[in-house]
């Protein structure tokens, strides 16, 4: 299967107005996106495909499409996507750990934020 960038999956065109990819594991993986599906916000999921022929799954007549999740699954899938986004390599939690471990940068941030506090007290009323 060929990798298809999830943001480019806009079929069926009669149903999809917009695609906002929330999580994408890349070639050979899967993706979740917020879709404007028939003028309603819905959640879609698909297998991206990998090297070789094809367009991933689902597809219709060799055109990549989304599987629209039932409303009952949306909240659970969104929660898990958020957890995965935070924990993945290069994700927000990793960046916070890096920042906390940088003592020089931490000292600069503290000095900057304390400077803001003193700036607030200098305002005339």
Image (spheres, rainbow, N blue to C red):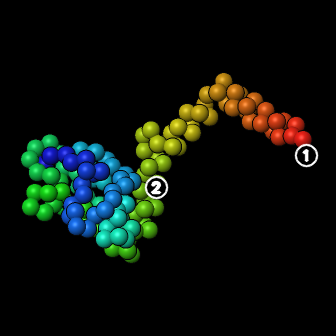
x and y percent of residue 124 in the render?
A: 90, 41
Give the numbered dot on residue 82.
2
Q: Quadrant of residue 38?
A: bottom left
- Left or right of 60: which side holds 35? right
Q: Residue at x 9, y 61 (%)?
A: 61
The residue nearer to you, when weighing 106 against 125, is: 125
Within 10 angstroms of label 2, few (less than 14), some, or many (20 or more) residues? Answer: few
Q: Secondary structure at mark 2?
A: helix
Q: Secondary structure at mark 1?
A: loop
Give the numbered dot on residue 55.
none
- Residue sitting at the far front: 125
Q: Which part of the image, by quadrant, shows the C terminus?
A: top right
The residue nearer to you, when weighing 83 against 3, is: 3
x and y percent of residue 53 in the render?
A: 8, 47
Q: Is residue 1 visible?
A: yes
Q: Residue at x 64, y 27 (%)?
A: 105
- Residue sitting at the far right: 125
Q: Is residue 69 visible?
A: no
Disc 1: which residue: 125
Q: Quadrant of residue 123?
A: top right
Q: Is tag 2's residue or tag 1's residue first in the polypeptide sequence?
A: 2
Please state which of the two labelled residues, at mark 2 or mark 1, is closer to the viewer.
1
Q: Residue at x 84, y 36 (%)?
A: 118
x and y percent of residue 82 in the render?
A: 46, 55
């Amino acid at each position: 299967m060929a990798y298809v960038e999830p943001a480019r999956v806009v079929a069926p065109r009669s149903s999809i107005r917009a695609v906002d990819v929330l999580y994408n594991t890349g070639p050979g993986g899967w993706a979740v996106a917020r879709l404007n599906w028939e003028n309603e916000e819905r959640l879609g999921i698909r297998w991206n495909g990998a090297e070789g022929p094809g367009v991933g799954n689902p597809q219709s007549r060799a055109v990549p499409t989304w599987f629209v999740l039932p409303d009952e699954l949306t909240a659970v899938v969104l929660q898990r996507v958020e957890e995965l986004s935070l924990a993945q390599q290069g994700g927000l939690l990793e960046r916070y750990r890096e920042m906390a471990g940088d003592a020089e940068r931490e000292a600069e941030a503290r000095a900057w934020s304390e400077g803001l506090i003193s700036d607030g007290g200098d305002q005339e009323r």
